[in-house]
């Protein structure tokens, strides 16, 4: 459908010699991956961490359409600091105290996923969880104290990179009245650009 939308957009603006379409959104949500999928090859560098795309990059999609891969944009939507971290907007290594976000991760993840990922049977709270994980992985400071900072950074990285499964169900179609109106649902919605349209 996205390819068809872009083709229709090109027809609607037939008076223009070229059209640029920006792909914008939060950091680390797959903007570059969408462009790579549309081109059916890797034309944009990707990484499972925020901040990989640092400059605007123009990618030729069709004869008259270019896609613009943009650095992540952080919207002021009233998110808490925890929401910002768990959305993958901030790299865990740059957090002054990464341990304060572990409780939220343990609450949002299913216990069986955490048990399978880290090999721990049970825990009482986030401190007990990090203590057990530090001892299991040998992440100890001088004197045998758990290295909470290193453990917390690792857990947040696992969350941001999808090692800990988490999803939110999309809204019902009934809640999206009018969405996509006027556009046909053709087959092969995410197929690569056809040979006659693609720019070599």
Image (tube, rainbow, N blue to C red):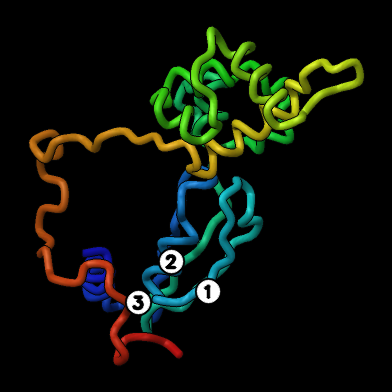
Residue 157: which quarter of the image? top right
Residue 92: % across, % down:
67, 34
Query: Compared with residue 14, is residue 176 higher up or lower down, i.e. above or below?
Result: above
Residue 23: % across, % down:
44, 57
Name the residue that disc number 2 marks.
Answer: 35
Q: Residue at x 49, y 64 (%)?
A: 68
Q: Are marks 1 and 3 in contact (CB under 8 Å)?
A: no
Residue 16 — which label? Answer: 3
Estimate the spatial distance between the alpha carbons at disc 2 and disc 1, rounded to whole Å.
8 Å
Q: How many marks?
A: 3
Q: Are marks 2 and 1 in contact (CB under 8 Å)?
A: yes
Residue 120: % across, % down:
54, 24
**In the picture, which quadrant includes the N terminus?**
bottom left
Answer with mark 1 or mark 3, whichever residue precedes in sequence: 3
Query: Compared with residue 159, is residue 129 higher up or lower down, i.e. above or below?
Result: above
Q: Residue at x 15, y 53 (%)?
A: 180
- Check disc 2: other Cα within 10 Å, few if <14, some if 14-19, many if 20+: many
């Amino acid at each position: 459908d996205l390819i068809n939308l872009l083709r229709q957009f090109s027809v609607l603006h037939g008076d223009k010699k070229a059209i640029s379409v920006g792909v914008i959104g939060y950091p680390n949500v797959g903007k570059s991956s969408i462009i790579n999928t549309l081109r059916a090859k890797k034309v944009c560098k990707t990484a499972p961490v925020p901040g990989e795309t640092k400059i605007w990059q123009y990618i030729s999609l069709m004869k008259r359409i270019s896609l613009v891969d943009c650095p992540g944009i952080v919207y002021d939507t009233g998110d808490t600091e925890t929401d910002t971290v768990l959305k993958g907007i901030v790299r865990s290594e740059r957090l002054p105290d990464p341990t304060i976000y572990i409780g939220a991760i343990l609450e949002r993840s299913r216990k069986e996923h955490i048990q399978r990922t880290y090999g721990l049977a049970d825990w009482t709270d986030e401190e007990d969880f990090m203590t057990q994980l530090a001892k299991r992985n040998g992440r100890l400071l001088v004197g045998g104290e758990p290295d909470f900072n290193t453990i917390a950074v690792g857990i947040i990285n696992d969350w941001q990179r999808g090692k800990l499964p988490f999803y939110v169900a999309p809204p019902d179609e009934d809640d999206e009245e009018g969405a996509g109106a006027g556009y046909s649902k053709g087959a092969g919605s995410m197929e690569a650009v056809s040979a006659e349209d693609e720019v070599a």
